[in-house]
Image: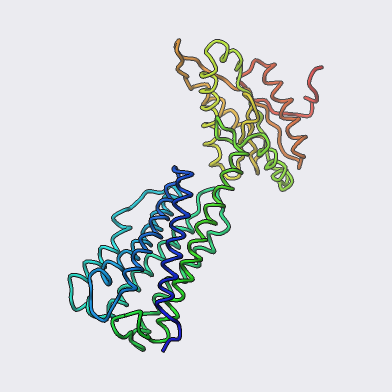
Amino acid sequence: MAAIHLPTIMLGSFAALLVFSMFFILDWLRARHRLELLMWSLSFFTAAIGFVMLSQRTSDYNFFTISLGNSLALAGLAFVWVGLRLFDGRRLHIVVAFAGPIFWTVLTAGFPAIGSSVNIRLCIYSVLVAVYSMLIAREVLRDRVGETLPSRVVVAIWFFLHGSIYLLRIPFSFLWPVAAGGDTRVLQPFWYGIITFELFVHIIVGGFSFFVLMKERMEWEHRKAAETDALTGLANRRAFFSKLDRLTSEDLGRGALLYMDIDHFKRINDQHGHSAGDMVLSAFGALLSSCEAVEGCVVARLGGEEFAAFLPDTDEGEAMVFGNRLRAVLAREAFKVDDGEISVSVSIGVASGCALSSDELLKRADIALYRSKLGGRDRVTLWTPDVIALPA
C-alpha cells in the first residue's frame, strides 16, 4: 500500500497546472503572434479542469469524473502537441490531435463494460498517454533547419520517459490491480502512488521546459536578426566575415570567393526610385539564396549593392562557371517598373584558394571585381598574379 497521499498530489498538480496556464496566457497577451503560447496555456488549463474532476472519482462510473475528466487531461496533451506544431511553423492536424480524447470519451461512455472496469480503463488510458507523449517527443526533436535549441533533446527525452513510465502501468495493473475504481481518497497499490507522483513532477518539468524552449527560440531569433540583412534575408557583412574567417582557416586551398556588385545601381535608384532599387536587390538576394543549397556555400549582402559568396572546396574553373551562371540568370530577368521594364547586370570578381586569409581573399576578389567594371561590366573576372593592384 502506498504512503503517498494521492489527494494532496492531485491538488498540487491542479495548482501547478493553473499557475503555468496563467503565466503562458500572460506571455501570449504580450506577444499575440505567438499562438503556441495560447495553445500551451489552454493545455495546462484544460488539464487543470480535468484534474479537478478526476479528484472526485468514486468506486462507481460517472461520466464527468471518468470520461470527461480523463478526456480533458488528454486534451491537455493534445494542446501541447498543437502548440509545438505552431512553435515550428508546421501544418496543424486538429482532428488527429484531438482524436484521443474523443476516442476515450466514446469508449468509456458508450461501453459499460469498459467504463465500469478501472483496470481496463487504466490500460487504455496508459496507451493513449504514451502515444501523445511519444508524438510530443518526436515533434520536439524535429528541429528547424538552421536552428539549434539545446533543450530540445532534453525535453524530448523527458516526454519519452513519461510515456514509457505510463506504459508500465499496464503490467502493474495486472500484477497489483487498482482498487475502488481508482478513487484517490483510498489507499491504492504502491506503484499507483509513485506513478501519480511522477505525473506531478512531469507537470512541473514539462511546464518549465516550454518556457525554456521559448526563451531559446527568442534568443535565436534575436541573434539571427543581428546577423541578417533585413531587405534580402541574407547574412549581413558581420555574419559573413565571421563565417568566412572560420571557413578559410579550415579550407585546404580549394575555396573561392565571389565579390559581386550590381551595375549602375545608383542610376536605377535615380531614374526609377528606391522601390525599384529595393526590388532589384531583393531579387538578386533571392537568386543567391538558392545557391545556399550548394553544400557549404555562404552568401551575404555586404552593404548597398555589394554581395559576396564563398564556395568551399571549389577551384577557379568551377567558381568562374558558378559566377557566369549567376550573371546570365540576372541578365535574363526583366524587372517591371512604373515606366516599363529594366534589365540589370552584375559584375563579379573571383579569387580562390591557397589557404589565404579572409582579408587577402577579399582583397584579391575586390581587385578582380574592379577589373570587371573596367572591362565593361556584366562580366566575371578571375584574380591572377599579374593583376596586382588597383590604380591610384
| Along the viewing direction, whichever of 102 and 91 lies nearer the viewer | 102
The C terminus: image quadrant: top right
Position of 220 compared to 124: left or right? right
In the displayed structure image, the side of residue 237 where residue 363 appears, left or right? right
For this orientation, the residue located farthest to the right is: 392
User: Which coloring applies here?
Assistant: rainbow
Name above or below for residue 160 compared with residue 255: below
Q: Quadrant of residue 371?
A: top right
> Residue 257: horizontal and vertical position, in percent?
67, 35
- Answer left or right for 17 relative to 262: left
Residue 369: image quadrant is: top right
Taking the spot 31% from the left edge, 69% from the top edge, the residue there is 53
Residue 333 x/y as whole percent: 48, 22
The correct choice, above or below, for 187 with respect to 302 in the image is: below
How many numbered badges does the structure rendering display?
A: 0
Residue at the (59%, 39%) spot, across then down: 225
Percent x, y for residue 290? 52, 36
Q: Split into 4 quadrants, where in the image is the N terminus?
A: bottom left
Q: Residue at x 65, y 40 (%)?
A: 314
User: Is 333 placed above or below 354 here?
Assistant: above
Image x and y of residue 183, in percent: 32, 80
